Amino acid sequence: MGLRVAGRLPSQVRVLALTSSPGRIEELRAKGLTPLVGNLDGFQSLRRLAGIATRIIHLAPPPSAGWADSRTLALVRALRLRTKPVSVVYGSTSGVYGDCGGQHVNECRSVHADTPRARRRVDAEARVRFWGRAAQLRVSILRIPGIYAPDREGGTPRARLMKGVPVLRPQDDVYTNHIHADDLARACCRTLWQGRPQRVYNVNDDSAMKMGDYFDLAADLYGLPRPPRIAREGAAEQLPLMLLSFMNESRRMDNTRMKQELGLRLLYPTVATGLQSR
């Protein structure tokens, strides 16, 4: 979804932004950030982070192949070289829960990742939590579902609706979860200062919708045709493998802990309000 800075940070805080692209340096500076060039796929480029990064938000995805997250491992190795940070926030995915059959899911549920990308996230969670326990530092895990942002290109279902990509018929459909990018940014900032040690937080809004209903809602808001509905039996022939994998998992995430412990009041508590924001 791109870089987004939100929430209430203390005025004296200097925000450093790690980027692997030198071409983004001026863009980051224009946002009031201090850019650092480094690559999570290259350990040596991360060494300068040690000792200067006191509070860390790690949102980078794992590599696209393998069973482990070498990027998170490289970051942890670099940060362990000098004085430990005060707090670390790792942005994981709700996919670590796997298919829950539409049940309500809180953070006490065991992970049961069904896809290679979710298993890499489980590996990353384990690495940062082990580091937190071993070094006695405050590590928090955010389990994040689908992120959307109406002010960003590709940040809403509009493009998919215009292509007429089908969704599952109601009797085959799955529950899906969402979070507005601004609310996610605010959750990251709150967790950085208020998250409890080795704590997991579901970061999602209050919507409890099936995927097809979500796309129907978006279509109605945008004045576009609703997507066609298909049976699960024929979905494999009509949908990309990545999209099909999301349709194989159904869960309704419980965000009670996020609200009670972080005190986060959502700006966009439902996708209906969030999709109409600017």
Image (cartoon, rainbow, N blue to C red):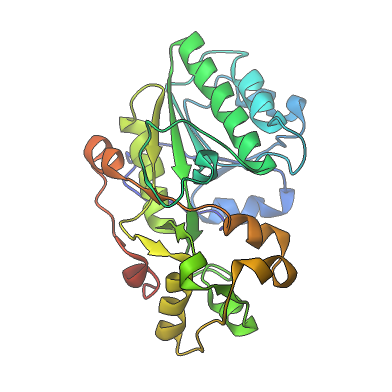
Task: Residue at 49%, 10% (x, y): give it.
Answer: 135
Depth check, front residue: 215 or 87: 215
Q: Is residue 106 left or right of residue 34?
A: left
Q: Height in image: 104 above or below 30?
A: above
Q: Position of residue 65 (x, y in %)?
A: 77, 40
Quadrant in the picture for residue 210: bottom left
Q: Is residue 97 left or right of residue 239?
A: left
Q: Is residue 46 left or right of residue 79?
A: right
Quadrant in the picture for residue 231: bottom right
Depth check, front residue: 178 or 83: 178
Q: Position of residue 61 (x, y in %)?
A: 63, 43
> Is residue 66 among the parts visible in the rendering?
yes
Q: Position of residue 71 (x, y in %)?
A: 69, 32
> Is residue 150 among the parts visible in the rendering?
no
Quadrant location of the C terminus in the rendered image: bottom left
Task: Residue at 57%, 59% (x, y): give it.
Answer: 247
Task: Residue at 54%, 35% (x, y): give it.
Answer: 112
Task: Residue at 54%, 53% (x, y): give it.
Answer: 3
Q: Height in image: 259 above or below 252?
A: above
Depth check, front residue: 123 or 23: 123
Q: Height in image: 42 above or below 102?
A: above
Number of numbered discs overlaid on the protein picture: 0
